[in-house]
Image: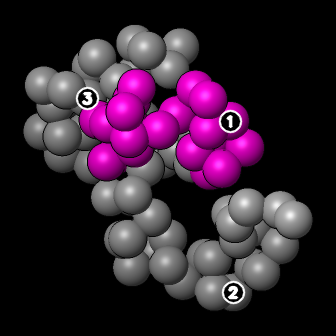
């Protein structure tokens, strides 16, 4: 759940141990962009650690490249 992820990330930089791993990649595939699609659940007030983690992964070079090369995957608010 969103709460459990946020609680875990309060004390951990990444999901599984002290390094970026497949656990982060797989969970980011689900959670990345939730701050746009479900702002009532994922936001700076209620889930600051989860939001930090989402932004941290989105800032990684491979994630930036993916968003640049696959425009339909760009997670931006829809008008």
- Closer to the camera: disc 2 or disc 1? 1
Q: Secondary structure at mark 1?
A: loop
Q: Position of residue 23 (x, y in %)?
A: 42, 35
Is label 3 in contact with label 1 (beta carbons under 8 Å)? no
Q: Quadrant of the C terminus?
A: bottom right
Q: On the picture, is 45 further left or further right than 11? A: right
Relative to residue 58, is residue 3 depicted above or below?
above
- In this picture, residue 33 sits left or right of residue 9: right
Query: In this orientation, does residue 29 appear?
Result: no
Toward which corner of the image does residue 66 lie, by quadrant?
A: bottom right
Residue 49 on the magenta segment: yes
Q: Magenta stretch?
A: 33-53
Q: CA distance from mark 2 to mark 1?
A: 25 Å
10 Å crowding of disc 2: few (<14), some (14-19), many (20+): few
Residue highlighted by disc 3: 9
Instruction: Reply above or below: 24 against 15.
Output: below
Viewer-side residue, 35 vs 63: 35
Q: Which residue is mark 2?
A: 69
Tag 2 and tag 1, C-beta contact below 8 Å: no
Residue at 73 percent of width and 43 percent of height: 37
**Count of numbered circles in the view:** 3
Which residue is identified by label 1?
Answer: 38
Q: Measuring 43% from the left and 49% from the top, which residue is drawn there?
A: 54
Q: Residues within 10 Å of mark 3 (few under 14, many from 20)?
A: some
């Amino acid at each position: 759940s969103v709460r459990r992820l946020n609680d875990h990330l309060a004390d951990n930089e990444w999901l599984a141990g002290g390094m970026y791993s497949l656990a982060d990649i797989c969970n980011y595939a689900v959670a990345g962009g939730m701050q746009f699609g479900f702002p009532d659940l994922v936001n700076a007030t209620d889930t600051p650690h989860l939001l930090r983690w989402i932004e941290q992964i989105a800032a990684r070079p491979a994630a930036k490249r993916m968003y640049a090369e696959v425009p339909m995957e760009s997670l931006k608010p829809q008008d």
